[in-house]
Structures are given as C-alpha cells and as structure tokens.
C-alpha cells in the first residue's frame, strides 16, 4: 500500500517504483474523465497530427524553393513538385492555410474536451467532498479543501487544455524532424544527435527535483489560502481585536515561505532552460559550421542545407519547450494526486442524484420520534485519550420535549452530534423507534431531523431560497405558510423585494432575530420528526426572543424535541430535563423535581443564574 505523510499526502520520499505507481493511478483517474468525450478527443488528436505533419512539410518545401531558384540544382527538386519558384511559394501558402485550419480545429476541440472533462471532475470532487463524514472535516481546514477544488483543478484544466496538446505536438515535431534530418544528411544528423543524451540525462535529474518542488510550492500556496479563508471568516474578531497587523504579518510569513519554494523552483527551471538553450544552440552552431563546410565543397545543395537548418530549428524548438511543458505536467500530476486523495476518501453515503435521497428511503415510514441512548461511550478521533461521553443512557418518548443542561464542555453538543450521526459511539447503542440508528439509511435519517442553532447560518441568496433549503421543491404557498408560522412573514413582507430580498453572505443583512426566524421557518418547512434547538434564543434581545419563542412553541408541537440551553429560564417548560456533567448523566426530571433537590447540580446552576439576575 502507498504511504502518506502526516497531512494525508503521498510521501515524496517513497521508493521510485511506488511513486511512479501513484503517478500512473492519478493519470488513469484523470484519463477516465476523457472517456465520455473520446469522439471529440480523437478528432482533436487527428487534427493535431495533421497540423504537425504539415508543419514538417514546410522546411522541405522551403528547401525545394531554394533549389528551384538556384541554377544547377533544380535536379534536386522532386519531380512531383513544380520547378517554378512562384508555384512552390503558392504551394507553401496552401499548406500553411490547411495547417492553420487544422490547428484552429484542434485547439477549439481540445479546449472543449478539456473543459467538459474537468467540469465533470469538479462536480464529482465537490459531490464527494460534501458527502464525507465530519471526522474528515474535523482534521482539515476549509482553506486547504477550497484550494483542492479551485487551485488544483484549475491547474489540471490548464495542463489538459494547453500543456498536454503542446507536449504531444512537440514530440511529433521532434521525432518527425529527426527522421527527416536523417533522410537529408546522415553525417549532420550524427553531429546533431550527439548532444541529445546529456540533455535527456539532465532532464531526468531536474525533473525529479522540479516535481518535488512543484508539490511543495502547491502546498505552501494552499497554506496562504487557508490564512485568507480563516481571516475573512473571522473578520469580525480581527476588527474587534485590532489584529489587522497580526494577520498581515501571518499572511506575509506564509507568502515568504511560498516565495522561497517558488523561487527555488524558478532557479531550477531557469538553470534547466539555460542549459538546454546553450546545448541546442551550440549544436546548431556546430551543425551550421559543418553544413557550411559541406556546402563549400559541393557535398550538399543550398536547398538541402536550408531543409536541414529548418528541421534542426524544429528539433531544437521542440526540445527547448520540453522543460517548461514537463514542469507544467509535473504540477498537474501533483494536483491530480491531491484531488485523487479526496476522491478516494470514503463518503458517508453515495452522493445522491440531484435532491433525491439514496434508495430505501421511500420505503420507510416516517420516524415517530422515540430515541434511546444505551450506555454510550464516545471520544473524538483527534483526541482518543479524552472520553467525552461516559456511559450515557436515557430514553425519550415520541413528542417529548427534553432539555440537555450542564456546564460548558460536559458533552451536550456531542450528544446532538451522535443523534445526527455526525459520529458514531465507540461503545453503546443509539436506537430510534426501537431500531439501531445505523440500520436506517443515513441521508434518510437526517432528513427526519432538523436543527435550529444558536447562530443561524444563512446562505447568500434570497430569503425565499433560504427557507426553501429546508425542503427543496416546496411550493411558494408552503414557503410563505412556514414563514407565517415562524413569525417571519411580518418582517419579510415590508421589504421592497419581499421574499426575494438578498440576505447577504451568512445573512449579514438581517438582524439576529430575523435570521433565527428564517431558520425556524426552514425547520417548519422540513416538518421533522425530531427537532434540535441548540441555544436558539440565547443571543437575542427580549422582543426578538419573545417572537422567536412563539415560533419555537409552534414548531415543537407534536415533535420530539431536544433543547440545549445554558439559560435555564428557557427550559422550565420542558417535559424532562437531563443534566450532564463531565460526560455523565447525573440528574433527570422536571424543573420542579430537580429544583427541589437541595444538593443537585441543576439546583446549583439555577441558583447561580437566578441570584445573579436578582
């Protein structure tokens, strides 16, 4: 099996054979996306071959033109070509016209194939990304993932559309040029080919170094993207703590690290290109000197010399471009490996087609809402030494309203995460309607639940779209009715654009209470069997809290409800209060029952809050 480093990337110190296998697998994965477009791809390759062959015809016709114009050498002009310089020139223009047409067709067709293939790759990568489990996201930062789906795929697209076709073209010109040179003069060919072996050896050495440098540069650039992502997401805190200078310095240090790697790569490429330029042009000088000697003693004609020089220029140009093209291809290989790593991650469930949930969902009756935790033990994969839940057991009946109360860090949010199956317990069971939770299709199970968080996250579209997110495909009447039940219609209707009002990124154009009521309308539209309220009113003013509480009371009717709250006044009307401390269930009962206990944790927390208010 392949080895990976601490960040899940292929180990660059792998044995050569293993690393080559990784490269081949990455290339095969990319080529699979070209298969649906193989008809267009074959047409583009045909046009590429025709264009390259016609390019190789030009030096031959140029030599014939020189021989046709030189007295005493017309015998060297092939019989199938006109011996008149005007007709040879016209033939050259005709060849150029066909060559230009085939180049245009190849370029546009290859671009179409490349963009379609990468668009499919982008869709699959995004679909795989959002279907990965929470454990995956807990170990990676948003900026790194964003870099994979943007910068890496852009690099692949650029290489597929530009570098690979050019690479193939230059190979054809190189092989064709060497063949035709050999047919023109064997002696000059041997002189020219003598410089190729050292160039190839050096290319292999530089290629290894450039591949490693390219991968490191991509990783450093991704790290700068992570900083930008984190800074912009937390811009409120940056401004509040006046940490602009700190963030500028952090980004600057990251950019300096990237620059050191990028400049080292530039020096590598520059040294390689300089060597190739010196070697090839030195070879051309040697060939010209040898050719001039042969021309002087009459061993070759001026036309043959012209052909040879032009073919030599073709070969030199092709070899000169290999350095840059090879570097681009190596970058694409590194980017493909990173994307392939993402595609190899195991998703929670197969990405659904459109908005349709996976199979089996339609055949199951809706949940009644009975939930049971049976001796649940849990720790996060990133902190295996810290057990967050230690034998939690309780049962919730359908329609019952249960409040989870306890100090910060006691495990309340972890219970909700397990309920939503963001994670699974290491030991113990979670049952729903009497069946183990893993027996249900995961997407279907989550579709039976809805959560109203403390900070309602809205997307940057319209209010209508944000409410409809609870049940894509809902009618306008259903969306407006959900808004009325959430007491959101009363602030939406006065807006000039009404339900089409844009909320801005993360809902910044709405107040906290307005965002919360939109989130409640979304939950009402989803019509879940199990409702989760995570500090849904803790950050609101009194009037907003009153309106939101009215909406929540409507939403909780007839549904199993889990309420997380630090403000105990909001959980007094719960059917049952479950008190969690240090990962253990320490008390359970109604507000009155728990408050009457003289030494209970709930009584202690309640007195602290109520006395502080008093």
Image (cartoon, helix red, strand yellow):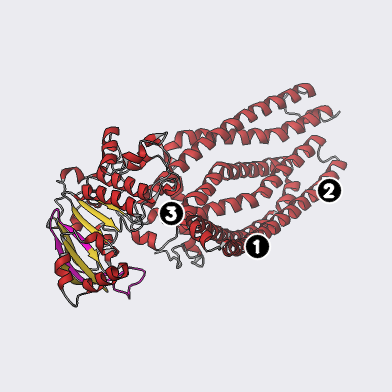
Whether label 1 touches label 3, CB < 8 Å: no
> x and y percent of residue 560 in the render?
18, 54
Which is nearer the eye, 273 or 540? 540
Q: Is residue 209 magenta?
A: no
Q: What residue appears at the point 33 percent right and 58 percent down from the top-left corner?
A: 538
Q: Residues within 10 Å of mark 1 (few under 14, many from 20)?
A: some
> x and y percent of residue 276 in the render?
71, 54
> x and y percent of residue 508 in the render?
44, 48
Dot 2 falls on a residue whose secondary structure is helix
**Residue 232 visible:** yes
Which-is-in-front pick, marks 3 and 2?
3
User: Which residues, given as a range, are shown in magenta?
Assistant: 375-403
Q: Earlier in the sequence, mark 1 or mark 3?
A: 1
Q: Earlier in the sequence, mark 3 or mark 2?
A: 2
**Residue 354 visible:** no
Q: Which residue is mark 1?
A: 264
* Disc ID at residue 340: 3
Q: Earlier in the sequence, mark 2 or mark 1?
A: 1
Q: Residues within 10 Å of mark 2 (few under 14, many from 20)?
A: few
> x and y percent of residue 402 in the render?
19, 60
């Amino acid at each position: 099996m392949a080895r990976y480093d601490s960040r899940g990337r292929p180990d660059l110190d792998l044995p050569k054979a293993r690393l080559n296998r990784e490269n081949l697998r990455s290339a095969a994965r990319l080529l699979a996306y070209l298969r649906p477009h193989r008809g267009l791809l074959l047409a583009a390759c045909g046009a590429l071959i025709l264009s390259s062959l016609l390019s190789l015809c030009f030096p031959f016709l140029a030599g014939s033109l020189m021989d046709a114009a030189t007295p005493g050498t017309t015998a060297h002009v092939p019989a199938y070509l006109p011996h008149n310089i005007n007709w040879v020139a016209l033939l050259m223009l005709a060849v150029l016209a066909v060559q230009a047409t085939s180049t245009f067709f190849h370029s546009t067709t290859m671009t179409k194939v490349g963009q379609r293939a990468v668009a499919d790759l982008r869709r699959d990568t995004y679909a795989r990304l959002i279907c990965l489990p929470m454990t995956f996201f807990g170990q990676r930062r948003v900026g790194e993932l964003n870099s994979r789906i943007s910068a890496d795929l852009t690099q692949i697209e650029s290489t597929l559309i530009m570098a690979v076709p050019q690479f193939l073209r230059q190979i054809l010109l190189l092989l064709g040029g060497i063949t035709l040179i050999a047919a023109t003069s064997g002696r000059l060919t041997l002189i020219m080919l003598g410089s190729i072996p050292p160039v190839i050896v050096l290319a292999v050495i530089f290629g290894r170094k450039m591949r490693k440098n390219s991968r490191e540069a991509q990783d450093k650039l991704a790290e700068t993207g992570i900083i930008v992502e984190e800074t912009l997401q937390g811009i409120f805190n940056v401004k509040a703590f006046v940490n602009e200078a700190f963030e500028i310095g952090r980004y600057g240090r990251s950019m300096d690290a990237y620059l050191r790697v990028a400049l080292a790569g530039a020096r590598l490429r520059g040294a390689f290109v300089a060597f190739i330029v010196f070697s090839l042009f030195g070879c051309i000088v040697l060939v010209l000197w040898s050719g001039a000697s042969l021309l002087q003693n009459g061993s070759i004609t001026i036309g043959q010399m012209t052909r040879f020089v032009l073919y030599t220029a073709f070969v030199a140009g092709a070899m000169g471009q290999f350095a840059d093209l090879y570097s681009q291809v190596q970058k694409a290989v590194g980017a493909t490996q990173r994307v392939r790593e993402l595609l190899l991650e195991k998703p929670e469930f197969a990405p659904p087609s459109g908005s349709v949930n996976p199979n089996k969902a339609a055949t199951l009756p809706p949940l009644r809402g009975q939930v049971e935790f049976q001796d649940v033990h849990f720790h996060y994969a990133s902190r295996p030494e810290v057990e967050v839940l230690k034998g939690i057991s309780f049962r919730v009946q359908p329609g019952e309203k249960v409040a989870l109360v306890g100090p910060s860090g006691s495990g309340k949010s972890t219970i909700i995460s397990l309920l939503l199956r963001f994670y699974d317990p290491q030991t113990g069971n979670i049952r729903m309607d009497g069946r183990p939770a893993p027996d249900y299709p995961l997407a279907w199970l989550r579709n039976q639940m809805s959560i109203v968080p403390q900070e309602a996250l809205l997307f940057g579209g319209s209010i209508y779209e944000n409410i409809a997110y609870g049940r894509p495909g809902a009618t306008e009447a259903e969306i407006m009715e959900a808004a009325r039940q959430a007491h959101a219609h009363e602030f939406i209707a006065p807006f000039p654009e009404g339900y089409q009002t844009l909320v801005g990124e993360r809902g910044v154009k709405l107040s906290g209470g307005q965002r919360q009521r939109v989130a409640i309308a979304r939950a009402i539209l989803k019509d879940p069997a199990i409702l989760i309220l995570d500090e849904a009113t803790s950050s609101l003013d009194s009037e907003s809290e009153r309106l939101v509480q009215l909406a929540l009371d409507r939403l909780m009717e007839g549904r199993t409800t889990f309420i997380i709250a630090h403000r105990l006044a909001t959980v007094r009307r719960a059917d049952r209060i479950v008190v969690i401390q240090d990962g253990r269930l320490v008390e359970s009962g109604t507000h009155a029952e728990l408050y009457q206990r003289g030494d209970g944790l709930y009584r202690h927390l309640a007195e602290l809050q109520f006395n502080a208010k008093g």
